[in-house]
Amino acid sequence: MSAHETDAATGADSTTTGDSRRWIALAIVMTAAFMDLVDATIVNIAIPSIEHDLGASFGAIQWITAGYALAFAAGLITGGRLGDIYGRKRLFLLGTAGFTLASALCGLAANPEMLVASRLLQGAAAAMMVPQVLSIVHVTFPAHERGKVFGMFGAVVGLGAVSGPLLGALLTEWNIAGLEWRPIFLINLPVGVAALILGRKYIIESKAPKALRLDLVGVVLVTAALLLLIYPLTRGRELDWPLWGHLMMAASPLVFGALVAYERYKTRKDGSPLVELSLFRVKSFAAGIAVQLTFGIVLGVFFLVWTLYMQIGLGWSALRAGLTGVPFSIAVSVAAGLSVQLLVPRFGRKVLQTGALTMVAGILLYFFLAGRYEAGISPWQMIPALVVMGLGMGLIVAPLTDAVLSEVPKEHAGSASGLINTTGQMGNAIGLGLVSVVFFGVIDDRGPAKVPADVTAAFVDAFRNSLGWVAVVLAGIFLVMFALPARPKQHLEGGDADGADGAGGGEPDGLVEKAPALAT
């Protein structure tokens, strides 16, 4: 091991913690995290351009977004464990290389099938890259500097939430070299190459002293269960809901049951299951996972139908739609900062419940405005509803992880954090699949549109129907939140980062992994 590599037993090398090179390493991993976050938020705004250029069906459009979330969710915990076992620097560089290659394939896609496959590869590569980010930070910086570093990550999250949709709108609108939507992926190439070159030089290597073993069977089972549910949801509408689709969806809970049985066996065999089932005996954790899953579904539904409503239903340009979303993103960032620093320490769980009710209020206001103004609605008329929704969302996303982890035993904090992040991505993928039911189902019921006015009316109705379902789910989330602890009892930031149990190196707060959920 070289002088600039970490000691596996301590997770940090005293010769590097005072080295200014660590700030270069921080810039590299933060840039990679930003690249992943932007890529998760940038695609929606370019969907109409992709649909037009490639002739993609709405089912393919759903898979372009859901495929990334599905692959990311399925590989997230395993990616963290691979870093613990084989080295976080090694897995970070491998994931970054895969992400860059997949971005190139996305940008060069000749048809919808190639784009969907490339997005799946991109999500899988992100699952190797992202879990290493905070682990690398933890072994690179001494404890007294980590608070400042994690604050910088918070700024990156906020910046990514704002800049992703707007950057996607600008790149699509500019139509650089006649490439239309493709630069939203190709922009990752120089960033990824620079991260690889500099990362090899400046990032220190580290491994967990007691990493858990891989659970590839668990990964296969959870992926199969999700595919059995999501594939027929996205394809069923185009194929008039065939019998095999219903059978696949019915088989999904059976496979989830098989996963639970196997995880119990895996726990008895070597104590390294993909899912630590004992965590679900903690009431607050089980409730928090339910909140995380359903909140992911809400975000998956809303952000896709919102884009379709503005750009196809109302006929707005990508830039107009992207600018319309800026007040929402700013409201999320402001409320997220206030909730963690000021509100949660004083009011605890009530902050999250207030966030859920505030989001419901914003959605109901949007429901009213969309119905009142119909095709004539302007961005300015949407802003009040979007700001209220954004404030509510910010009150939830920032403190949710700490609330869920509050009563989890410290030795399981890493596994719990990884499971929370994975569950959020799973919910997002399921929500994107459900768009076929809550949005396109309404459009199909209206029959074929003969004139543009019919298209707009159908999309307005479908959007309002989706908002209604989102409001109902959020009301349910509000009720489930009563099972969360009234006050968070501990925070992972001061926890044992190197007690890595496979969830990305026992990351302190899962900040980067949950960031894509902000505006996916």
Image: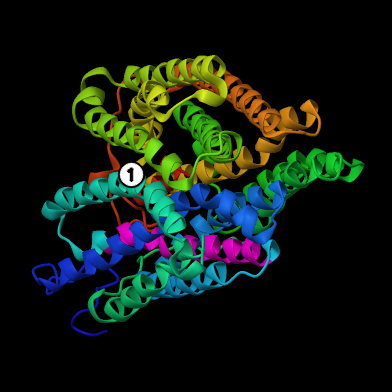
Residue 247 shown left or right of residue 368 in the figure: right
Residue 72's x, y, as percent? 53, 56
The quadrant in which residue 342 appears is: top left
Secondary element at tag 1: helix
Tell me if residue 45 comes above or below residue 350 in the rendering.
Answer: below
Tell me if residue 507 comes above or below residue 484 in the rendering.
Answer: below
User: Looking at the image, which is closer to me, 342 or 59?
Assistant: 59
Residue 451 shown left or right of residue 190 in the figure: right
Numbered circles on residues, count: 1
Q: Which segment did they paint magenta?
A: 114-136
Whether residue 120 is in magenta: the answer is: yes
Residue 334's x, y, as percent? 25, 32
The answer to whether residue 512 is seen in the rendering is yes
Q: What is the three-letter code of the residue carrying label 1?
A: Val
Tell me if residue 346 comes above or below residue 341 in the rendering.
Answer: above
User: Looking at the image, which is closer to me, 394 or 466?
Assistant: 466
